[in-house]
Image (cartoon, rainbow, N blue to C red):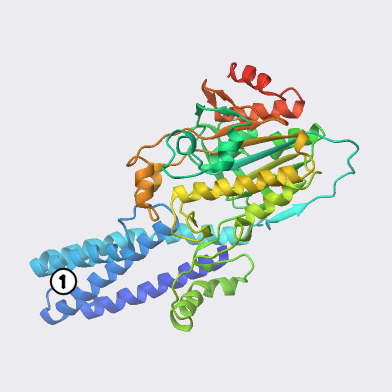
Amino acid sequence: MARALAVDLAALSLLAMVVVRVLERLSGAGDGAEAGANENRRSAGALLWALWFGLLAARAIAGLIVSQVLWWRQVTTGRAFLVVAGLLLILWLASPHWYGLAIRATRFGSLLVGFCIFWMIPVLVAAGLAHQPWDQAEFKKPLPAATAPHPRVIWLLFDEMSYDQVFVHRYPGLELPNLDKLRGESVTFSDVEPDGFFTEDVIPSIFLGDPINRVRATISGRMLYRTAKHTPWQRFDGSRTLFADARRAGWTTGAIGEFNPYCRILQGQLDFCWMGLPPLPDHFSRDKSTLENVAAPLAADWNRLVRQKAAPAVARSGNSPLDELGAVRAGDALIGDQAIDLCFVHLPLPHPPGRYDRKTGRIGPGGSYIDNLALSDRILGQMLEEVAASGAEERTTVILSSDHSWRVGLWRDSYGWTKEDELASGHGHFDPQPMLMVRFPGETAAVTIGRPVPLLAIHDLVERMLAGVMGDPQQLEAWAAKQ
């Protein structure tokens, strides 16, 4: 993929040079004449330069949107084209002289940006020549025969679930029966202090027990992190995580999740793993050869525009979210395997955008965060049924948490924000509190802990469960009083 990107970038750069040369000749710029000096060429050149820079602006905006640098729904590729091309044409009509100066300045700015190719191409070539890890998306290692029943911990992490939206300011008419039932049997923390804003920072920090400010990857696929803005980068070491401690204590381990490469960074610490990574943009794939990836974007556009007839999107139906979400299927398989003692299941809900219609019970695009909450509750009910059916419920502790709350400010001006989201958020109010509930085996009473507890304390909480010194609500309340 890296080699294909390098080839595509070089080819597009050469094509752009040809286009610019043609525009120069049509506008009279190629022979040294000022833009606007020749009236006949000025008319064609003005239109072509304005269209060219409008197209460049639209493509740049498209790239920023795909890479999730831009979130605002007001910014679109069409609007970018209209603004840039329109302003240039208006300037040409008002003053051809100033228009010529604007075009020359814009071309000079584009030239400066173009120098980036002298570091982009070498970096891509280096990445293409470096050894790249071949991610194993799932695995299950052989396990020794169990000699006696072992305690289990099922840790369900619902991405971006807000305590405020679930229990404090629930949207009118939203029913969450499984969350309510679990709360009635659990210790619920009503004042959890967030650990961070992004999934890739929060979850590894809980695994390690250290706050993480930022993560990044090396060319060879290793994960680096730092604990503060100006501290040195450190290599993520799976042998320092909860899962390594669990195995040293004689527990078997499993992890399910999306977005984070769990099967790579915890390969030596997990007995069971499944991960779902987001699809790559522009139809690149590790399963294609370099030449196939070079042609992949163009082939996909050709296939979409020429060979396929446009068809309206139809929401997929099914009797169960298991039919639609790979993490749910894998999570159920992990929970149902009594041989795995510590089970971590990271679910990509209720993380926006909406992917469910709670009125019809169908999974598909177009829903709201409130719809995603309803789907999360439905999935929770299925997973709790798996716990009950596993034959190990009487020795299973269930932890339900989230990595962060609903990031209203991040999503409010982005694609997919709905009127229901606007009303549910109180017109943009952000409550930072994530979720944390613990249900011990056999518990049927509700307990609420109102004192502040940092989300990062989950690390110590699980460590105590692994050590066998955290097994009932009284011990948990005493532990929380010391946080």
- Three-letter residue code for mark 1: Glu
Taking 352 as reference, is 306 above or below it? below
Image position, residue 267 (x, y; %): 72, 47
Q: Nearer the viewer, residue 442 or 301?
A: 442
Q: Nearer the viewer, residue 154 or 321?
A: 321
Image position, residue 478 (x, y; %): 64, 17
> Which residue position holds label 1?
34
Q: Which quadrant, please, contains the N terminus?
A: bottom right
Residue at 60 percent across and 41 percent down: it is 157
Residue at 52 percent across and 65 percent down: it is 5
Indicate the quadrant where residue 99 lies.
bottom left
Residue at 19 percent across and 66 percent down: it is 86
Image position, residue 104 (x, y; %): 21, 65
Marker count (numbered) = 1
Taking 414 as reference, is 424 above or below it? above
Q: Nearer the viewer, residue 465 or 25?
A: 465
Residue 164 shown left or right of residue 130 in the figure: left
Q: Is any part of residue 324 visible from this angle?
A: yes
Residue 160 shown left or right of residue 397 in the figure: left
Taking 157 as reference, is 128 above or below it? below
Q: Is any part of residue 267 visible from this angle?
A: no
Q: Which quadrant, please, contains the C terminus?
A: top right
Residue 105 shown left or right of residue 212 in the figure: left
Q: Report helix, strand or loop for mark 1.
A: loop
Image position, residue 82 (x, y; %): 24, 66
Q: Nearer the viewer, residue 297 or 403?
A: 403
Residue at 91 percent across and 37 percent down: it is 147
Name the residue at the left extreme: 94
